Image (tube, rainbow, N blue to C red):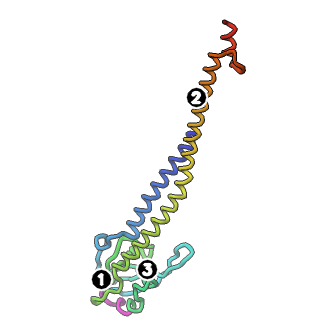
Amino acid sequence: MKKKWIIHIAIAIFLIGLGLVNYLYLQHVAPLHLQDKSFQYTGKCVNIDREIKEFGKTNRIMYLLSMEDGREFWVDSIYAEQGKFDVSDFYKAVPDNVITVRYIDFNYSLGSFAKKAVEIQADSKTLLAMDAVAESFKKTHIVIWIAYAVCLTLFSIPLIFSIQNERAQRKLTAHRQQTKAQRRAWLDAHPEEKGAPPSARRKKDRR
């Protein structure tokens, strides 16, 4: 019985820990309220490289911006796929120009200090809007929390049934023990009855 409860407690701790990991991961990778969580940088972009990053079984293009002072930023091509980022305008406006980048402190190992750009402006033109990135981040939150809810449900339902079954078994065992005790007490008081326990028969003989 103790082993089962240890397993139940371990599963509960795992589920709570998984929720905490989800929260911390999202705060790092896709924070909400980007205006407060992002930083601003202005500098000259000297080069744009295309990197291919693997996400499970799929690949995605990342645009790596190298700045004149050695800073690096990356832009996810998913915004272009969503129609919120024009790659041709990006290539025309960014290279060899001074741009303003708002970014979060997160990288995919694209360069030693490459940070994720959440807004890019060049010549007062917004090439990547923060609102578009924020909307994408919200969708990421929804998808991950739905996945967590499914995982929580899959773990919780068997756990709840197991706890209920254990409680039912304990009640049944207690009821059986109580019935046996009542039966024994009754037979002790009526040793003449068939099936009386030895203790009851000895009491009868002594009489």
Give the structural element (helix, strand or loop) at label 1. Answer: strand
- The alpha-carbon separation of the residues under discs 1 and 3 comes to 17 Å
Quadrant showing the C terminus: top right
- The alpha-carbon separation of the residues under discs 3 and 2 comes to 68 Å
> Where is residue 174 drawn, in percent x and y?
57, 33
Q: Is residue 135 toward the left or the right of residue 98 in the image?
A: right
Label disc, if present, on residue 19 of the rendered structure: none
Q: Is 99 rendered above or below residue 137?
A: below
Residue 31 magenta-highlighted: no
User: How many residues crowd mark 1 within 10 Å: few (<14), some (14–19), many (20+)?
Assistant: many
Label disc, if present, on residue 76 of the rendered structure: 3
Three-letter code, disc 2: Gln
Q: Earlier in the sequence, mark 2 or mark 1?
A: 1
User: How many residues crowd mark 3 within 10 Å: few (<14), some (14–19), many (20+)?
Assistant: some
Q: Quadrant of residue 203?
A: top right
Identify the residue at horizontal 52%, vertical 74% (top origin).
55
| Number of the front mark, 1 or 3 | 3
> Where is residue 4 drawn, in percent x and y?
57, 44
Instruction: Identify the magenta region.
Output: 92-99
The residue wearing badge 1 is 100
Label disc, if present, on residue 178 of the rendered structure: 2
